[in-house]
Image: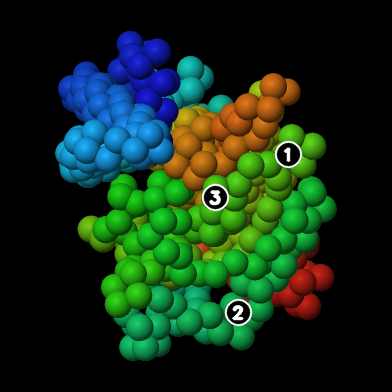
């Protein structure tokens, strides 16, 4: 979340940034935050003064008792009793207004970086790089939802029977291809200096607030209400929360982690041809890379992370493009996001397979993730993450773009992991 000092000292800039995101009520949101914070300061001041006066009177009582002035001491005790009642009421009021302020801040998105383009929707995203040529498919080529039935490698009907729509079974060579991609992505990340972690796939409420899934994405997460735990939408959440309430030594920066997990998303309100087959699932596998950086180095790290993802797509021999997302299409917590999309020749459309984002201090402020500077003062760090990669749409593109009359050819880089060259 945004810092109060940041809002107070850069009010006009914050409002302009929110409007770049399409937040029309930006002025009223910021004014309300500042109004509540001013009230909080007033109550905090009264509370502090009351406590100070109580402490001073307590010392006075002790001195009067030593001097044998019990009557005078009793009079002062009466004053302290009144101050305690006042202090309790102020403390409760302070707690209430601090919670109100926190909720207001939770509902304000991050401010876009200056290099984020203007725009309201995905139509305004800017393509900054393209790679590869569109595959020329043979006559009669099919989309992946037909191919998986022909070769019996993914079963949506069985998944629907056992769980519901959007929970497929991967079978035979389909399951082995999934495992191959996961191992390939993990190996590539480790070669790039990422430390692998295996995380829980259930998180508590505090972790959801820490990385910004709550309250923004509450309706999109699966919630185990009895235990108040949430199924993770991405490995970013548990990995980044490893550093909640942590002060890192600058010598240990950057932090670089990679994790493979299943991901769970309700995708409420999704329908139509664009969500058919593997295009959108309720459960899917993903390899996630996460970095924690000194603020001076985070945008260099963002570039490196994008290049890492692009390298994976090139090794998989997939046509792709990179988009700089506009203000209106960025995620709630992001300061800048680059999307990688692969081209599906059978569907004749681009499919998003990765988002790489810099959150600057937005998550770190929620997490209280800090470092000590040269003056021994604590400062907020920058957090970043990216999909490297999400499997379903990558798999869809591999199946569709590599189909031939003889079968589906496996990308050469995956053959050592699959143990086979063809699905036929």
Residue at the extreme front: 68
Colour basis:
rainbow
List x then y, in percent, for residue 196: 72, 61
**Disc 2 to disc 3, how far (Cα)?**
35 Å
Assign a secondary structure to mark 3. loop
Q: Is residue 393 in view?
A: no
What mark, if any, has residue 175 been given in the picture? 2
Q: What residue is rendered at 48% in x and 82% in y?
A: 169
Q: Which residue is mark 3?
A: 244
**Image-based side of 293 in relation to 367, left or right:** right
| Circles 1 and 3: CB atoms closer than 8 Å | no
Upstream in the sequence, badge 2 or badge 1? Answer: 2
Assign a secondary structure to mark 2. helix
List x then y, in percent, for residue 117: 43, 21
Q: What residue is rendered at 50% in x and 55% in y?
A: 237
**Dot 1, crowdedness within 10 Å: few (<14), some or many (≥20)?**
few
Assign a secondary structure to mark 1. loop
| Circles 2 and 3: CB atoms closer than 8 Å | no
List x then y, in percent, for residue 48: 33, 29
In the image, 89 versus 155, the foreground residue is 89
Q: Quadrant location of the C terminus?
A: bottom right
| Circles 2 and 1: CB atoms closer than 8 Å | no
Viewer-nearest of discs 2 and 3: 3
**Image-based side of 283 in relation to 120, left or right:** right
List x then y, in percent, for residue 334: 46, 36
What mark, if any, has residue 249 been given in the picture? 1
Upstream in the sequence, badge 1 or badge 3? Answer: 3
Q: What residue is rendered at 47% in x and 27% in y?
A: 126
């Amino acid at each position: 979340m945004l810092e109060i000092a940041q809002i107070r000292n850069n009010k006009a800039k914050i409002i302009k940034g929110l409007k770049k995101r399409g937040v029309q009520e930006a002025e009223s949101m910021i004014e309300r935050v500042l109004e509540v914070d001013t009230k909080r300061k007033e109550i905090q001041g009264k509370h502090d003064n009351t406590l100070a006066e109580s402490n001073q009177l307590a010392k006075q009582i002790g001195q009067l008792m030593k001097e044998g002035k019990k009557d005078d001491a009793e009079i002062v005790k009466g004053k302290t009793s009144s101050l305690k009642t006042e202090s309790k009421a102020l403390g409760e009021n302070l707690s209430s207004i601090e919670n109100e302020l926190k909720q207001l801040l939770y509902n304000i998105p991050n401010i876009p970086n200056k290099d984020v383009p203007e725009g309201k929707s995905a139509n305004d995203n800017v393509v900054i790089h393209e790679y590869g040529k569109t595959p020329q498919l043979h006559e009669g080529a099919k989309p992946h939802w037909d191919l998986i039935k022909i070769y019996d490698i993914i079963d949506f009907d069985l998944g629907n029977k056992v769980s519901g729509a959007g929970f497929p079974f991967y079978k035979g060579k389909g399951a082995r291809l999934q495992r191959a991609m996961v191992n390939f992505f993990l190996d590539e990340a480790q070669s790039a200096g990422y430390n692998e972690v295996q995380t829980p796939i259930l998180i508590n409420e505090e972790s959801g607030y820490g990385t910004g899934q709550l309250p923004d994405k509450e309706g999109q997460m699966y919630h185990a209400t009895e235990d108040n735990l949430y199924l993770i939408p991405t490995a970013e959440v548990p990995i980044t929360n490893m550093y909640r309430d942590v002060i890192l030594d600058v010598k240990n920066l950057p932090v670089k982690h990679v994790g493979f997990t299943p991901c769970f998303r309700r995708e409420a309100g999704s329908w139509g041809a664009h969500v058919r087959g593997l295009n959108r699932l309720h459960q899917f596998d993903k390899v996630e890379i996460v970095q924690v950086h000194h603020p001076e180095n985070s945008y260099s790290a963002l570039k490196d992370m994008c290049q890492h993802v692009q390298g994976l797509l090139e090794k998989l021999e997939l046509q792709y493009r990179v988009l700089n997302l506009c203000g209106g299409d960025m995620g709630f917590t992001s300061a800048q996001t680059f999307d990688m999309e692969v081209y599906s020749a059978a569907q004749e459309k681009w499919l998003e397979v990765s988002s790489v984002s810099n959150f600057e201090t937005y998550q770190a402020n929620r997490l209280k993730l800090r470092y000590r500077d040269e003056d021994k003062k604590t400062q907020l760090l920058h957090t970043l993450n990216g999909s490297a990669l999400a499997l379903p749409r990558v798999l869809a593109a591999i199946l569709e773009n590599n189909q031939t009359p003889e079968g589906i050819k496996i990308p050469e880089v995956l053959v050592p992991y699959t143990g086979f060259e063809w699905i036929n």
